[in-house]
Amino acid sequence: MPLSLAHVTVDCHDAAALAGFWSEFLDLAVDEGASEHFATVGRAAGASPVLMFIQVPDKNPGKNVIHLDFHAEEWHQYVERAISLGAKRIGDFSEYGGQWTTLADPEGNLFDIGAK
């Protein structure tokens, strides 16, 4: 199964508020269950990729606030492939009902590869 782009994720201070802005701008509804901690725009409408907003304690200087999320059935294989191409594993996570690995590309830009 091919790798597919699932989300464009934005680290932010208030997920629901920022999702509201993008919802209005894109004329897509904020998906059900939005909170200050986590929100998506476009999932219910079948948009691809879905915009995802996640509250973070601070936006660290040097950390990109928008990153790509990839999903695949055999996602661990793609993690290993990315590492073999020069990516660095930042961490493994299990939150919001999903599992993923955060990596940094050779220039330090963050992206995630997770379970579909």
Image (tube, rainbow, N blue to C red):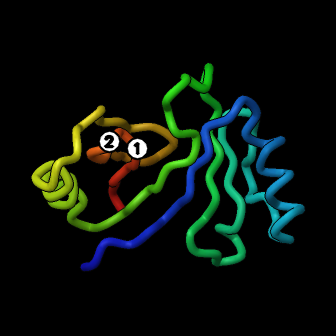
Direction right: furthest residue: 24
How packed is label 2: few (under 14 Cα within 10 Å), some, or many (20 or more)? some
Instruction: Find disc 2 in the rendering and name its residue.
Output: 104
- Identify whether 40 is placed above or below 49: above
Judge from the rendering whether residue 58 lies leftward or rightward of residue 33; answer left or right.
left
Could you tell me residue 77's position as x and y percent?
Answer: 15, 59
Q: Quadrant of the C terminus?
A: bottom left
Q: What residue type is labelled 1?
A: Asn
- Please tell me which residue is depicted at 31% across the width and 72% down the height of the picture: 3
Question: Image point 69% across, 47% down: which residue?
Answer: 39
Image x and y of residue 54, in percent: 62, 39
Label 1 crowd bin: few (<14), some (14–19), many (20+), radius 10 Å: some
Q: Mark 1 points at which residue?
A: 109
Residue type at the position of mark 2: Ala
Is 116 situated left or right of 7 in this image? left
Marked residue nearer the N-terminal end (1 or 2):
2
